[in-house]
Every structure is written in C-alpha cells, then in structure tokens.
Amino acid sequence: MTVECIKNSTAHRFEGNPIAEQHRLRYKCLIEGQAWNAPFIDNMEYDQYDNPATVYFIWRYNKQVKGVARLYPTTKPYMLKDVFSHLVSYESLPATAKVWEGSRFCLDKDLCPKQRKQAAQELILAYLEYCLEHNIGVMVPAYWKSVFVNNGCPIHWLGEESIADDGKRVRAGKLLVNHKACEVVRNKAGIYGNVLSYGCEKRGTMASFLKL
C-alpha cells in the first residue's frame, strides 16, 4: 500500500514519468469522462495550479497511475479563491502556509469497485499523513465531499451546498487534520501502516529513502 508523494523537484526519484502520467489520467477522467471545459494538450489535462509549488499524490496499480490527488498552498492564488469563492460563506478564505487546497482527486474508471475504494482510502490517508507531518490543514475537493465523508473524515463546512454547471452538487469544506481523525479513517479502511512514499534517490550503488 503506497501512495507516491511527488513534486517537480522530486519526480526523478520515482519510476517512469509520474507527473505526465497523472496529467494523462486527469485527461481520461475529466476531459473524456466528464467533458470538463479545462485546458489540455497531448491528452494531458492541466491548469494554472500545476507548477513547482504543487504536491501530487499518485496511486499506481500494476505500475500504472490509476489515482491522483494534489495539494496546493493558499499563500498563492488558488482554485477555491479564484473560481469557487461563492462556495465559501461561513468564514474568510484562507491565505496561510497552514492551510493547503486539495483538488483534482481522480480515480481511473477502469478500476473495479474494490480497487477504487482502496485507492480512494489510501489517497485520503495520504492527505492526512502529509498534513500531519507538515503541520498543515487541507480544504477538500468540492466535487468529492461524499468520498471523504463516507470514509470517516471529519469535515468542517465552509458554506452551503451548491449546484455546479454540470448539475452536480458541490460543497466546500475543510478536513480536520489530527491524529484522531487519521485513526478513524485507518480503522474504517483497515489500513494501519503509513501509505506515503517520498521515493528514493540513487547514489552510486546505494539508495537512500528521502523525505521532501
């Protein structure tokens, strides 16, 4: 059970071209699967929040990228503030190093239900583990609130539910990050070991495990 935690600066520690592969998965899920009006090129979906500040969580099956989620700092212009600010009415939008935005939570539609559930649970735990380790909180992806709620995540809502342009119900919220919340999700998923991998960097014949 491993979720790869990758930035542009650490992509060389991982097999293949994981950042390009997650863009291709997003194209498959969002452009082909949901007809999103989002930019793309060479069958890769992307936006302005894909840059060196972005942290990607990548889930593979048989060495292929089948799940992805990302984190982005609210100290820079971010999606909820730029595009979905109408979803936030209970409090001010954050602009702090202590709160990051989660987005682009995608699972390959070709996964069977059991695999999709496993991928979703491990990606949620990746959010929790990373945020605990870096002492930050995370705002959950507006389109995926049911996934987080159904897996035991305590959510603090930032506004009322709304209807998106595609007719789907969306709601912005904050994932309450603490060890108790992580324990609840682990118990529900039956996953008790850490899922995050920061990759390895080869030095001669030795490989050492490195953190971001």
Image (cartoon, helix red, strand yellow):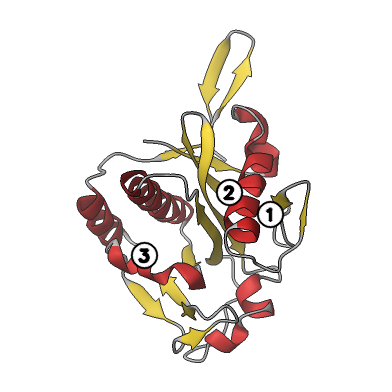
Q: Which residue is mark 3?
A: 148
Crowding around mark 2 (Cα neighbors within 10 Å: few <14, some 14 to 19, many 20+) is many
Crowding around mark 3 (Cα neighbors within 10 Å: few <14, some 14 to 19, many 20+) is some
Residue 84 percent coordinates (x, y): 61, 81
Q: Residue at x 55, y 65 (%)?
A: 100
144 versus 85 height, above or below: above
147 versus 70 height, above or below: below
Helix, strand or loop status at disc 1:
loop
Amino acid beneath label 3: Phe
Q: Mark 3 and 1 residues: CB-CB less than 8 Å, in contact?
A: no
Helix, strand or loop status at disc 3:
helix
Q: Residue at x 61, y 84 (%)?
A: 85
Amino acid beneath label 1: Ala
The quadrant the N terminus occupies is top left
71 versus 96 height, above or below: above
Question: How far apart, in angstroms, are the residues tagged by discs 3 and 2?
Answer: 18 Å
The dot on residue 53 is 1
For marks 3 and 1 on the same chain, the one whose residue lies earlier in the sequence: 1
Q: Nearer the viewer, residue 171 or 117?
A: 117
Residue 177 percent coordinates (x, y): 37, 63
Amino acid beneath label 2: Tyr
The dot on residue 30 is none
Crowding around mark 1 (Cα neighbors within 10 Å: few <14, some 14 to 19, many 20+) is some
Residue 14, picture quadrant:
top right
The dot on residue 56 is 2
Q: Residue at x 32, y 65 (%)?
A: 153
> In screen coordinates, is 210 left or right of 120?
right
Q: Nearer the viewer, residue 178 or 120?
A: 120
Q: Please name which of the two marks, 3 or 2, marks the residue nearer to the observer.
A: 3
Helix, strand or loop status at disc 2:
strand
For marks 3 and 2 on the same chain, the one whose residue lies earlier in the sequence: 2
